[in-house]
Image (cartoon, helix red, strand yellow):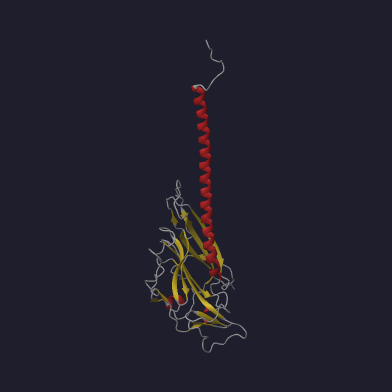
Amino acid sequence: MRRCPQQQLGFTLVEALVSMAIGMFLILGAATVYTQGAYSFKTIEGTSRIQENLRFAFDTLEPDVRLSGYWGLHNGSGSIQSDEIVITCEGANVSEWVLDTYVGITARDNIQASNSDNVAANARKAANCGAFGNGIQPDSDILEIRRSSAATRPLTGDTVQIKSNRNASHLFSNGAEPTGFVNEVDIDGTFDYVFNTYYVAQTSNNVADTPSLRRRTLQGTTLIDEEIIAGVEDMQIQLGLDLNGDGSVNRYIDPVDGTFNADSKVIAVRVWMLIRAEYEELGLEDNKTYTRPDGTTYQPQDAYRRIEGSKTIFLRNSRS
């Protein structure tokens, strides 16, 4: 008879089960590490994207705010004269709003803030020149800026421009130098007139169902609406006032339809923003309470990742 060899020819059932259990444990551990790593990467990437968007929003606002009150060769808005200029928005005449002539002094207010509920809330603004889409984000603020361009521009027709010397400025839009305006010797004092109204819209034309930072801006003699960046959910403005003329901020106030003590002087603007991701994040629940500068709170309770930030910007042409 032929006898079987004594060596082992394979695994026993117990050994196979133990090997499978160890293998499954290692696979489960690797999958857990991969899942946690992927989630951490997604979290870091999402947070970085939001931070980048917040920086972009502040970087857009800051130079505009800093130059508020710059009128070419001087910074006295009280000495600005104007031709008859017609500015339209969606077919409506918005000249009084844009040039701030509704009180009889052209471009009197270099910078204004409002907590009204629509870009066209005041009577001097056209009803059909309001916020984009479904309107402005509830409880957010509006910031209006008036100034001249930082650099000189060539004379251009159908464009609101400002001719400036060291004593006065003159607004016009026909591409011709104002009659009787005395220019500085060897100095070209022609600038474009800049008007921007920043606000937070409830939606975006780039990302559906997402709030966005937008602005009504002057292009030629027409107000157009353009998106700055999607994801900005709230913007709050505080005005820094110099109450005693020493060139420093004595108090920050919240805007009340843009009005404050006539003897005070705005020399700084504090901007607070709340910005969120464009899409919800699986497994995330944002139940944090966000406190606005005016003390009101907001608790979203959804799956969007958010960050908040603030920046104080001093006006170059308003400090003594």
Q: Quadrant of residue 103?
A: bottom left
- The residue positioned farthest toward the right in the image shown: 186
> Along the line of sight, which residue is nearer the eye, 3 or 255?
3
> Along the line of sight, which residue is nearer the eye, 226 or 145?
226
Q: Quadrant of residue 208?
A: bottom left
Residue 250 appears in the rendering: no
Residue 57 appears in the rendering: yes
Residue at image x 50%, y 61%?
A: 272
Residue 23 drawn above or below residue 117: above
**Residue 235 in the image: x percent, y percent?**
47, 62
**Residue 270 in the image: x percent, y percent?**
52, 64
Q: Quadrant of residue 222?
A: bottom left
Residue at image x 53%, y 61%?
A: 56
**Residue 17 in the image: x percent, y percent?**
49, 25
Residue 143 drawn above or below residue 83: above
**Residue 193 in the image: x percent, y percent?**
51, 77
- The residue positioned farthest toward the bottom in the image shown: 180
Residue 53 drawn above or below residue 13: below
- The residue positioned farthest toward the top in the image shown: 1
> Along the line of sight, which residue is nearer the eye, 4 or 148?
4
Q: How many marks?
A: 0
Residue at image x 53%, y 47%?
A: 41
> Along the line of sight, which residue is nearer the eye, 206 or 296?
206
Tell me the quadrant of the picture where the C terminus can be found: bottom right
